[in-house]
Image (cartoon, helix red, strand yellow):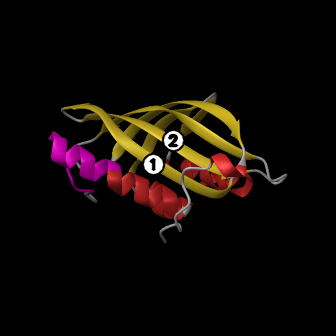
Amino acid sequence: MTTRPPLPPFTEETARLKIQAAEDAWNSRDPERVSLAYTVDTEWRNRADFVNGRADVVEFLRRKWAREFDYRLRKELWAFQGNRIAVRFEYEFHDADGQWWRAYGNENWEFDEHGLMRRRFASINDLKITEAERRFRWERTK
């Protein structure tokens, strides 16, 4: 079985490390890389979408990033206990028409004993912004 440290139960330090690893992976915009942090049978709710399993995660992320250009994400610790972490996040992107968006919300994560995320529940709101209102202007990590 593959392990994905840090492993639960989380401390503040290890929860922050787990969050940074997730932020780095999502900013890569590589669906396969991102999917490896999840159990094979992971369960997601992302807005009104329900995603089940790693293969669905990859397809979901391919569709997402095919329409969200210049995606940049930040995540921060909200709370943690045992094998669960709650995060607050913001990300920015523009669509095919050049309209910039800021999406923000909360995620609740639950991990298995190997450090793989078994459940992810995301509540997300979108806000139209101008290019001048962007906050996240760094180069993406690979």
Q: Is residue 9 magenta?
A: yes
Q: Amino acid at mark 2?
A: Glu
**Region in magenta:** 4-19
Cβ atoms at labels 2 and 1 below 8 Å apart: yes
Position above or below: 88 against 91: above
Residue identifier under label 1: 74
What residue is rendered at 51% in x and 51% in y? 73
Residue at the outermost right position: 97
Residue identifier under label 2: 90
What residue is rendered at 60% in x and 52% in y? 61
Place residue 21 in its image quadrant: bottom left
Q: Neighbour class for label 1 at 10 Å: few (<14), some, many (≥20)?
A: some
Helix, strand or loop under label 1 = strand
Helix, strand or loop under label 2 = strand
Q: Is residue 84 left or right of residue 42?
A: left
Where is residue 57 drawn, in percent x and y? 55, 49
